[in-house]
Image (cartoon, rainbow, N blue to C red):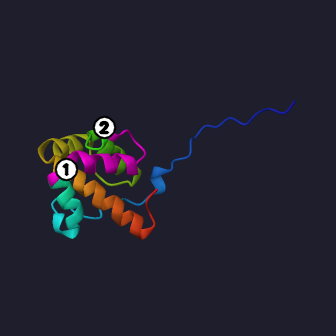
């Protein structure tokens, strides 16, 4: 009976990824006026769109968890504390930034 190899080191996917970046800044509302208007006048609708784009529950679209998950997925530098402060202090801007980023990544074919 052949012995099974023992794995001593796990593969590291993140070590090979290049640092990512947001496609637009937090206050770049003018880069997509449709998203900005939706975020200004119907933030729950925009948050639900963001959650739907990420295959998450509609109620989670404006949460710290969604922002942190998205930032982690695309290797965007930051922290959970930074995500919390961003969501807490400027929820509409944060949700608009997420939606603009999703739209840009779709256009570039790098949204997954």
Query: Which image quadrant for residue 79?
Result: top left
Note whether residue 26 is visible: no
Image-based side of 108 in relation to 77, left or right: right
User: Where does label 2 land, which residue?
Assistant: 59
Q: Is residue 46 above or below residue 1?
A: below
- The residues bearing labels 2 and 1 have C-alpha atoms spaced at a distance of 14 Å
Q: Left of 35 or right of it: where is 73?
A: right
Q: Is residue 59 magenta?
A: no
Q: Mark yes or no: residue 32 visible.
A: yes
Q: Secondary structure at mark 1?
A: loop
Q: Does 104 appear above or below 9?
A: below
Q: Which residue is labeled 1 in the image? A: 42
Magenta stretch in the rendered image: 41-58
Residue at the spot x=38%, y=54% of the render? 75
Give the x, y percent position of residue 20: 35, 60
In the image, 2 versus 59, the foreground residue is 59
């Amino acid at each position: 009976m052949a012995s099974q190899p023992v794995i001593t080191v796990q593969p590291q996917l993140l070590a090979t990824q290049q640092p990512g970046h947001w496609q637009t800044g937090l206050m770049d509302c003018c880069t997509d006026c449709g998203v900005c208007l939706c975020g200004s006048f119907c933030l729950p609708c925009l948050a639900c769109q963001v959650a739907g784009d990420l295959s998450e529950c509609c109620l989670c679209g404006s949460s710290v968890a969604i922002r942190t998950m998205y930032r982690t997925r695309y290797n965007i530098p930051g922290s959970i504390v930074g995500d919390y402060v961003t969501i807490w202090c400027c929820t509409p801007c944060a949700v608009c930034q997420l939606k603009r980023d999703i739209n840009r990544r779709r256009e570039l074919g790098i949204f997954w």
